[in-house]
Image (cartoon, rainbow, N blue to C red):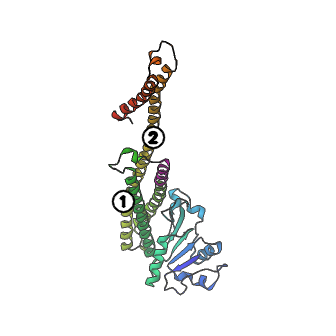
Amino acid sequence: MLTAYPASAPTFPFRASKEGKGADAQAAPKASWLDLLDPTEDERAAVESKYGLKLPSREELSEVESSSRIAEENGALFLSIPLVSHGRGVDEPLSPIGFVLSKDVLVTIRYTQLHSFEAVAAKLFKADARASSVDVFAALIEEMVDFNADWLEDIAAELDAVSRSVFLKSRTRRRHLTRSNDALHRTLIEVGNAGERLSRIRGSLLGLQRIVPFVAEPERDWIPGNIRTRLKGAHMDLLSLTDYETHLSDKVQFLLDAVLGFITTKQNDIFTVLTIVSLVGIPPTLVAGIYGMNFKNMPELEWAWGYQFGLALIVLSAILPILWFKWRGWL
């Protein structure tokens, strides 16, 4: 879908026909921002023919080398970044976003719905005023930075909740704090999902860090000083967000190590219990083995209470080790 902004343009919202030759397509040059969402070949051709631009393909936008991410040709800037469509799931991969920025128009190419684009479009529609291409670009960058910050804050809150649950201190007895395998498994999944989402947000932040200085640092006569100042401020925010993302990634690794440590401790506790149970059973087995031989010269065979004495000795030999282990804190 191809949409033209601002709302004051006669063609808003601009949607090219399937042939790319409709009345809307003829009026497209009046817009300062053309947003292509999963564009068709006809829509791409309509923009290219009107502006004399060669729009990059999805494969070109997905290339990772810096020379493919940022370029300048004939006074137009060609930029691309990977961006997360939402920060709450890990089922969708990073989607490439392309920017073709010139003095007269900004062309964006994307293949997924993005909150930042929708927010800027809503502001332009509400203002009903013509914003320059660089104004729109700066607004998009600021919105993307804000959304990345919000996603990092959400992940930080989730990690804090996991941390409190993992390191919960209570005065209840230790056996009441035993964690089930299901609970530990769920905690591992939560922490792992947070780590995966952080890695995707980091990809977006690094992509933004490449393109923002490329636009802001060189002095171009068609980029006003106030826009360059806004972009430099966004770049400073990106640097701080990258540091914050690194801190959260370290916390994710710490929580993963902690949960794995709890799993190891639980396994050790299980082996300890099994060892104690086996040791407790040895003395009664020894006593029963001795009195099960039934030799004639055994004095207890002639006792009136010999049988009861043997049973009591078996029970006592089982209880004494348990009391000893509890006194030593092993049980």
Secondary element type, mark 2: helix
Q: Nearer the viewer, residue 173 or 37?
A: 173
Residue located farthest toward the bottom when viewing the structure as drawn: 10
Q: For the residue carrying disc 2, how many other residues have a C-alpha within 10 Å: few (<14), some (14-19), or many (20+)?
A: few
Residue that protrudes farthest toward the front in the picture:
304
* Tag 2–tag 1 contact (CB < 8 Å): no
Magenta region includes residue 197: no
Whether residue 245 is visible, yes or no, is: no
Place of residue 162 in the rendered image (x, y in percent of width and height, measured from the top left):
41, 54
Give the residues drawn in magenta, as a range: 179-192
Q: Which residue: 48% across, 62% down? A: 88
Amino acid on which disc 2 is placed: Thr
Q: Residue under circle 2?
A: 264
**Element under label 1?**
helix
Looking at the rendered structure, the kind of residue marked 1 is: Ser
Q: Which residue: 36% across, 73% down?
A: 226
